[in-house]
């Protein structure tokens, strides 16, 4: 992630709840063995170069990133997952402190991440018999936490083979292999029948979609009528000026540092959700009133405290 130097007023983490109408820290050895995901050790360097070429800094363009999103995103996670797990834990997302400013009084990053996950589960009203889908589930940190918190069975959908193998191992260790599972597939074309799930959530994952409407439509399709989808999404705020070169540079850095084809604005995301068929029940810019900046864990001046 390349966010440390970024003017972050232009980026937010949006939460939305939508309705369909009627850290386990691994050791250094694990890090070394996982590095590169399914990329062979001798091919890691060329994978880095191929990944970089998708991005503006290295001559790439948005169209190529969108056309080749599977390759671009998988290369990113094959290369980055072990570092995420080592430095961040099992959940690969940010957490804000607006709903409980206790992070100032000693809340750790890990605690705030769990609270962020519990909040989503509560908003969805998860109950034990429900069949839940986690879209873009990483190695399953949120899936395990939410499954235990809500006593639900959760399917984690992910297009990255290496992350699924880590997730299955961590589910086995956590004793959740019987109630939760992983499916390797693209969230742009999910291998589920219409109206399969009682609730769906996505945490900082659908930002990787090449086409927001197409992705949200798939989520809408597999959600049962009358049920809800909740998500944390990365968006550019109204402060973002597409003609401002400094803003363009910051956006390009965010895309490069996070495997993103584009970073959509809040309005684009909300419009895409409505076009997919959802009624927006709640939406909020979580960065606005948080007493702790959401990017705090990337701030090198406080890095060691996190
Ligand atoms: C930032 S990670 C977040 C993971 C997880 N939600 C968490 O919070 O720990 C984004 C995830 O989206 C997944 N992803 C990206 N594009 C995808 C696609 N087209 N289909 C399925 N999963 C995808 C990535 O493989 C990765 O697991």
Image (cartoon, rainbow, N blue to C red):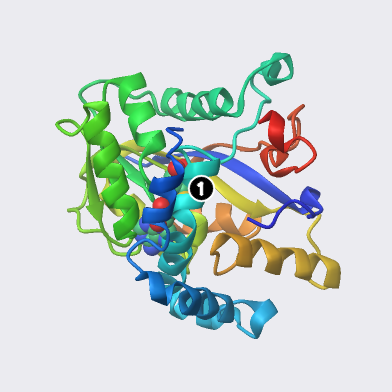
Tell which residue pokes out farthest to the bottom in this image: 59
Give the x, y percent position of residue 33. Answer: 36, 55
Q: In the rendered view, would you say 179 is above or below 13? A: above
Q: In the rendered view, would you say 202 is above or below 80? A: above
All told, the count of numbered labels is 1
* Label 1, residues with CA under 10 Å away: few <14, some 14-19, many ≥20: some
Image side of residue 63 versus residue 131, left or right = right
**Is the distance from the Cβ of mark 1 to the nearest ligand 1 atom less than 8 Å?**
yes
Give the x, y percent position of residue 162. Answer: 32, 57
Image side of residue 177 versus residue 273, left or right = left
Give the x, y percent position of residue 277. Answer: 41, 53
Observer able to see residue 143 = yes
Q: Which residue is mark 1?
A: 84
User: What residue is drawn where x is 55% and y is 48%?
Assistant: 233
User: What residue is drawn where x is 77% and y is 53%?
Assistant: 10
Tell me the quarter of the picture where residue 149 sits: top left
Observer able to see residue 138 = no
Tell me the quarter of the picture where residue 239 sits: bottom right
Image side of residue 266 versus residue 79, left or right = right
Q: In the rendered view, would you say 145 is above or below 132? A: above
Q: In the rendered view, would you say 1 is above or below 153? A: below
Name the one closer to the observer, 149 or 88.
88
Considering the numbered disc 1 on the image, is that residue within a helix, a strand or a loop? helix
Tell which residue pokes out farthest to the left in this image: 178
User: What residue is drawn where x is 32% and y is 62%?
Assistant: 186
Q: Quadrant of the image for the C terminus?
A: top right
Name the one closer to the observer, 288 or 254.
254
User: What residue is drawn where x is 19% and y is 54%?
Assistant: 192
Q: Quadrant of the image for the N terminus?
A: bottom right
Give the x, y percent position of residue 300. Answer: 75, 43
Tell me the quarter of the picture where residue 26 sits: top left
């Amino acid at each position: 992630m390349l966010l440390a130097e970024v003017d972050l007023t232009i980026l937010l983490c949006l939460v939305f709840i939508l309705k369909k109408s009627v850290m386990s820290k691994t050791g250094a050895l694990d890090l070394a063995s996982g590095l590169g995901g399914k990329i062979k050790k001798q091919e890691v360097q060329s994978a880095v170069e191929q990944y970089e070429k998708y991005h503006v800094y290295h001559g790439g363009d948005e169209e190529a990133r969108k056309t080749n999103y599977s390759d671009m995103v998988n290369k990113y996670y094959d290369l980055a997952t072990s570092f995420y797990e080592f430095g961040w834990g099992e959940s690969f997302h940010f957490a804000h402190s607006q709903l409980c400013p206790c992070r100032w009084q000693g809340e750790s990053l890990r605690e705030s991440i769990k609270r962020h996950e519990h909040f989503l589960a509560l908003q969805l009203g998860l109950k034990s018999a429900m069949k839940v889908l986690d879209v873009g589930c990483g190695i399953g940190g949120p899936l395990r936490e939410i499954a235990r918190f809500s006593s639900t069975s959760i399917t984690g959908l992910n297009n990255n083979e290496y992350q699924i193998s880590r997730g299955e191992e961590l589910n086995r260790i956590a004793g959740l292999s019987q109630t939760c599972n992983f499916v390797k597939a693209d969230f742009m074309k999910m291998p589920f029948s219409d109206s399969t799930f009682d609730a769906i959530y996505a945490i900082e994952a659908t930002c990787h979609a090449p086409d927001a409407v197409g992705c949200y439509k798939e989520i809408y399709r597999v959600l049962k009528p009358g049920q809800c989808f909740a998500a944390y999404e990365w968006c550019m705020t109204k402060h973002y000026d597409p003609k401002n070169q400094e803003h363009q540079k910051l956006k390009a850095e965010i895309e490069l540092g996070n495997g993103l084809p584009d970073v959509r604005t809040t309005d684009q995301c909300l419009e895409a959700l409505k076009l997919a068929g959802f009624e927006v029940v709640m939406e909020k810019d979580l960065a606005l009133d948080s007493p702790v900046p959401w990017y705090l864990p990337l701030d090198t001046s406080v890095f060691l405290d996190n």
